[in-house]
Image (cartoon, coloured by chain):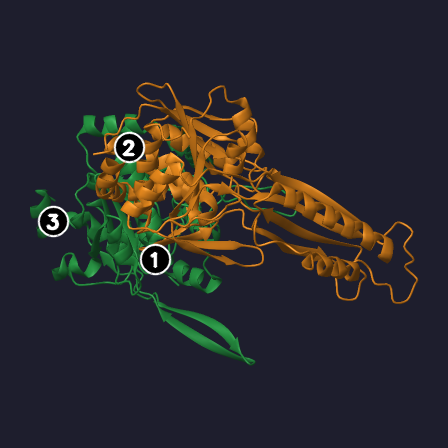
Chain colours: A orange, B green
Amino acid sequence: MSNLEQLVIALPAYRDAAEKVREMFLANLALIGEIPAPTFGERSRAEMVAERFAAAGLQACVVDRLGNASALLPGIEGSSTLLLAAHADTLPAEDNKPDIEIHQDRVVGPFVGDNALALAALATLPVLLEQLNIRLKSNVVLLAASRSLGRGNLDGLRHFLAESSTPFQSALCLENFQLGRLNYAAMGMLRGEMTCRLPANYDWAQFGSTGTIIPMGDIISRISRIPVPQRPLTTIIMGTVQGGISPGNVARETTLGFEVRSESAAILNQVREQLEDIAKDVTAQSGKQVDMDIYARREPGTLDIGHPLVRQGRAILGGLGLTPAFYPTTSMMSALLDLAVPALTLGLTTGERRNELEEIEEAAAIAPLSAGLAQLVAMVQAMDEGSGSS
Amino acid sequence: MTGWWTPRRTRADAEVVSANINRWLSQLTYHHSQFIDLRGLVAAKERQGLKISLCLPALNEEKTIGKEVVMFRSELMQRIPLLDEIAVIDSGSTDQTREVAAAFGADVYLARDILPEQGENKGKGENLWKAIYQLKGDIIVYIDTDISNIRPHFVYGLVGPLLQSEETLYVKAFYDRPLRTSTGVSATGGGRVTEILVRPLFSLYFPELAALIQPLSGEYAARRTALEQIPFPVGYGVETAHLLDIHQRWGLNALAQTDLGLRIHRNQPTAALGRMSFGILQTFCARLEKYGWIRSQAEFQNILRQFQNHDGVYEQIETLIREVERPPMISLPAYQQKFNRKP
């Protein structure tokens, strides 16, 4: 019987063991997730993650200069090193005392799913491995990465990888939602803002002044007409618009936030040029100043679907009765694939997000977490057997 | 009103009280971080042969009870065996409180099912009193169940002083409550009922007790040997009665208090604070009578009258608040038999 077959047979026992650490997992979730961690302000949460790593018996629990929390689970041999990572930061929120409610069947709270549950999984995994009496040959580094979202641009993970003296044989990126995802391809991504401002010499006395909202409407219209291919998959998301102070005042400044995603680096570059052309053209036609700022970029990358890591992920999810969902992701695995570290992104449970204007309330189901944790244990064992090699 | 009198105190008395308070504050006021060595606490518990029970009195707290049970069970039972028992004593919740607590491993009891021959009263104090019979611990920790930022130190910060000193019988929680003023100065204090009613009353009659920063906080830990000896008001007055009776019987040094940091919970409307104050006053007056400080409270009323304006008409709202008291648990034969205790 192959190692993979043995792992699949062990999955029910892993689920049972995960049930037994449920309270520990949920306590970790509340302790970590109730500390606000907007991008660039993750340090307090990182310190709590490091404390939970230490409580789980890990070694070298530290928070680095950029706010990454990391720890080491030493292997028996230690000849290779695996990386398990989850982003620690969240979008900014109004509430600086987030409250996570633990109900009988679900947990509810701001950013529970993105990504506090994944951090709780990292902090609970060592206890679960110990209860299952699993000793890994490889060293495992657990990382709660700072500065991932928005302008963070994966800086925390990139910094950690650059500073690390040890090459990683393979890596897993954890996201809470949705259990069953098996991302082996990273979408390329450009994230930025287009800002339209009134020029310094603007004539405020002129009746019928349009301000910056109308030119921004033109910009949005033009962007929506940029042709994007279905293959390679490409999409343009215009996610935010901000501008003006009241209905009766001319808006001095309007900003559009957008994200371009593509499986092709060439198409990303092409769309970027088109966006720059739109900015220049609207500047010339409207007399307003339009500037574009691309503040985050990720390169596309992928493993082969036949890569051992992907095969084992499929077998493990199948063993749990789950149909793997393959789709390219914009998660942090992009930074790992950039460095040729084989990586997958996995989900832990099912859930939903309710997005209010100033707050993101998320609900995550508790019952599927045992399968999510069992999947994690089995994947780490598979990686320990050397599936990182291509 | 007749029968009230204030004992005459001299300047020298006041100086003695101040000195006692200062000594108590310096010796028996703690911060939870002083007890962070949980393995040391467990060793002290085992050395002294003690069991520790956590009581969570509840009524319709389905949103917060899950996190409390999960937090204490994970951190203070599974990781570190400081607690021997976690029990929810429920007043008859109509939401999912009991189901949620049981799902995460708490022992769940309906208050009316405990000592059924003693009948049933409504109020948190009833649950606390019945917990003495139902729970096994030599130390019982009481934690309210409406706290949204619950942390393990809420328990170990209260248990620590009891494991540290056998003379300490009862440990009360207090919290950071910064009060902002127009000058930007902040100070630590109690809630509105504490600062407007209880601390002035303590200062008037039992000035040493004024040193308790938050005498009405719902979190405290105590030795069974003390809890079984004191009566329990079933309503608003239970916390005040505990402090008065323990102070009266064993003195200030039987009490300690611990700073538990920040506590986030629901805010009570002013009318509810009025009802609470009325109940506390009844308990306080009953104690003054019991200690012989006033002659009789027979003439006191137990209907609180509050008023609200409806379209220019003032409507009187009458609320009957009668502070029923349960006797010391040690006086019940069923308790004596179960715990092999003698009154």
- Which of the pair A330/A216 is nearer the observer? A330
Q: Earlier in the sequence, mark 3 or mark 1?
A: 1
Kind of element beneath mark 2: helix
Q: Where does the image place residue A63, in percent across and percent down from the top left?
A: 50, 27
Mark 3 and mark 1: Cα distance apart in space: 29 Å
The chain letter for the residue carrying disc 1 is B
Q: Which is closer to the viewer, label 3 or label 1?
A: 1
The answer, for residue B24, to whether it is visible in the render is no
Q: Where does the image place residue B198, in percent across and percent down from the top left?
A: 42, 51
A292 w.r.t. A226: above or below: above
In this figure, which residue is indicated by the disc labeled 1?
B61
- Which of the pair B123/A225 is nearer the observer? A225
Q: Where does the image place residue B87, in percent across and percent down from the top left?
A: 23, 48
Say whether marks 3 and 1 touch (CB < 8 Å). Answer: no
Residue at screen point 62% across, 49% down: A259
Crowding around mark 2 (Cα neighbors within 10 Å: few <14, some 14 to 19, many 20+) is some
The C terminus of chain B appears in which quarter of the rendering? top left
Say whether marks 2 and 1 touch (CB < 8 Å). Answer: no
The answer, for residue A169, to whether it is visible in the render is yes
Say whether marks 3 and 2 touch (CB < 8 Å). Answer: no
Amino acid type, residue under disc 1 in the picture: Glu
Mark 3 and mark 2: Cα distance apart in space: 45 Å
Amino acid type, residue under disc 2 in the picture: Leu
The N terminus of chain B appears in which quarter of the rendering? bottom left
